[in-house]
Amino acid sequence: MSESLAPYASAPQRGRGRRVPEPDDGARNAYQRDRDRVIHSSAFRRLVYKTQVFINHEGDLFRTRLTHSLEVAQLARSAARRLHLHEDLVEAIALAHDLGHTPFGHAGQDALNAAWRALGLQTVALDLQGFEHNLQSLRVVDKLELRYTAFDGLNLCFETREGILKHCAARHARVLEAHEPGGVGARFLHGGQPSLEAQLCNLADEIAYCTHDIDDGLRSALLAAEVLWPLELWQRACRQAQLAPQGAHTRRELYMVLRALLSLLVHDLVSHTQAQLQQHAPANTQAVRAGPALVGFSPPVAQGLQQLKSVLMQHLYRHPQVSHSMAQGQRVVQDLFGAYLQGALPMPDGQPVTPRGVTDYIAGMTDRFALREHERLTGQRIFDA
Ligand code: MG
């Protein structure tokens, strides 16, 4: 693969390395090792029982965070090959990108933030307050996975960690920066882009969830096909699949359309990015980090995706049934937070009974483990799992 790597791609031998230096493996490059460490982590295995949109027990065919992460890795990897970027790095980032998600999707994150607000803690310098799932993914690989005697976490390469930290609030970036000056938090304070591989994973994530949420939404019958008909991207995908954009599609026809949608998004991403790379011609990864974002969709497709996302927001993510499940999930997380902090439920040995310790513990839970703990606390079963 290294022969076909572009000058602006991340090459492990030119990377910034690991926080704790380790000897080379000999057989695998540094990003392959990172990918393998992610796959063998406990947090990765738990993704199978974490909600993407639908609570885990609502159906066996819906995406979970694990299948979502695999789809992101597949999309990112095939686009990386066409762009001559480092495939192993995008795979490592994609597989790790959602490790920090709480049970019950974004509802869990909202509940943890509400719990922190309720504590009314004063902002203490150099202390993480509240919860952000991207930052939590980084905490998982930097601190929370305990598999080595020499260090906490998985000791991943800078480039993998940079890609995992997709967004970060400035107050959290300042904490990161204090512990690791010029590290992965710096760009959220001083500007700058991450590697092209990180930029690519970000958009592969968007392609994956937009297309698979249509599939899951239609399958669950919470999303009505008619709301998709007026969408420019839906119409283009139907034309490519040689099907009428309106009217009931059979299951097979629907897959024809979804496949066309997926491939038109990936194709647009690759061709627009190729044009951008040709125009800006970054000489190396330093030039990539100092320049504008180069991985992207063409303006009409970017606009079409925005329309699609707002339809999904309005009709699926805010559907009363989804909102109801999420509100229950929020209650579970908030109840658990109080119970661990006040000692009504025991924390595992060695886990600090502090807001941060409790947050880390809850964030690591699967949906079903959180529900079991909640039942232990209240004697009530929230969902019929
Ligand atoms: Mg994701």
Image (cartoon, rainbow, N blue to C red):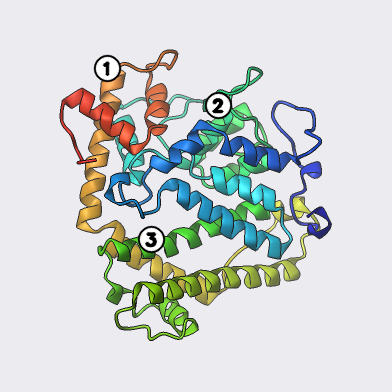
Q: Earlier in the sequence, mark 3 or mark 1?
A: 3
In this view, the residue in front, 246 or 194, is: 246
Crowd class of label 2 (few under 14; some 14 to 19; many from 20; radius 10 Å):
some
Q: CA distance from mark 2 to mark 1?
A: 24 Å
Identify residue type, mark 2.
Lys
Where is mark 1, residue-wise?
A: 342
Q: Is residue 171 visible?
A: no
Q: Amino acid at mark 3?
A: Asp
Residue highlighted by disc 2: 143
Secondary structure, mark 3, is helix
Residue 213's tag is 3
Give neighbour class at mark 1: few <14, some 14-19, many 20+ (Cα, 10 Å): few
* Of the image marks 2 and 3, the number of the one nearer the N terminus: 2
- Tell me: 294 left or right of 112: right
Residues under labels 3 and 1: Cα distance?
Answer: 38 Å
Kindly identify the residue that appears in the image at 58 percent across and 42 percent down: 189
Residue at 44% in and 24% down: 124
